[in-house]
């Protein structure tokens, strides 16, 4: 019977553990919750009705789908990068939608003030 050294056994264990870690990292699911909720928030904020916001909402959706495809093909770093872009575009769509709503509200307030001044004359 051949004698196996402790160093050989430890080296074998390290190789097995490293293989498990690498394999485990490859199967880590893409975390799309932030991007998905950002897209939903943009939709609820009315991004589809604001041209600039609508563009960024469309980009966020496309980037999310691209991130999913990249993750499925094993390109985790590119998928993570695309996912961050999706989240950023969704947030921008929300901000642009809110800005448009606030601008519309401000213009309505100015018009009400003008009407009150006119009525008081």
Image: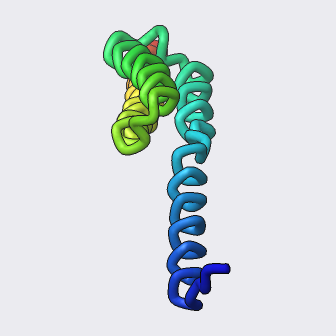
Between 30 and 121, the residue placed more toward the observer is 30
Task: Indicate the quadrant where residue 33 lies.
Answer: top right
Residue at (51% x, 68% y) in the render: 15
- Is residue 42 at all visible to an observer of this figure? yes
In x, y percent, where is residue 53? 39, 20
Residue lying at the far right of the rendered structure: 1
Residue at (59% x, 74% y) in the render: 13
Residue at (38% x, 28% y) in the render: 96
In x, y percent, where is residue 34? 57, 41
Residue at (58% x, 65% y) in the render: 16
Instruction: Determine whether 60 is above or below 115 in the image.
Output: below
In x, y percent, where is residue 4? 59, 83
Residue lying at the far bottom of the rendered structure: 6
Between 88 and 11, the residue placed more toward the observer is 11
Total marks in image: 0
Quarter of the picture containing the C terminus is: top left
Between 87 and 52, the residue placed more toward the observer is 87
Instruction: Determine whether 98 is above or below 21 in the image.
Output: above
Between 43 and 80, the residue placed more toward the observer is 80
Q: Which colour scheme is used?
A: rainbow
Instruction: Determine whether 69 is above or below 49 in the image.
Output: below
Residue lying at the far front of the rendered structure: 1
Quarter of the picture containing the N terminus is: bottom right
Q: Going by the image, does 19 lie left or right of 90? A: right
Q: Going by the image, does 69 lie left or right of 41? A: left
In x, y percent, where is residue 25? 54, 53
- Is residue 101 at all visible to an observer of this figure? no
């Amino acid at each position: 019977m051949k004698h196996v050294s402790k160093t050989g056994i430890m080296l074998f264990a390290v190789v097995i553990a490293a293989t498990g870690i690498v394999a485990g990292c490859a199967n880590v699911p893409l975390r799309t919750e932030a991007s998905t909720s950002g897209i939903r928030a943009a939709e609820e904020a009315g991004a589809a009705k604001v041209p600039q916001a609508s563009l960024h909402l469309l980009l966020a959706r496309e980037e999310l789908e691209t991130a999913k495809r990249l993750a499925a093909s094993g390109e985790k770093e590119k998928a993570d990068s695309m996912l961050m872009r999706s989240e950023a575009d969704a947030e921008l769509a929300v901000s642009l939608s809110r800005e448009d709503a606030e601008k519309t509200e401000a213009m309505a307030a100015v018009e009400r003030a003008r009407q009150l001044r006119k009525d008081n004359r």
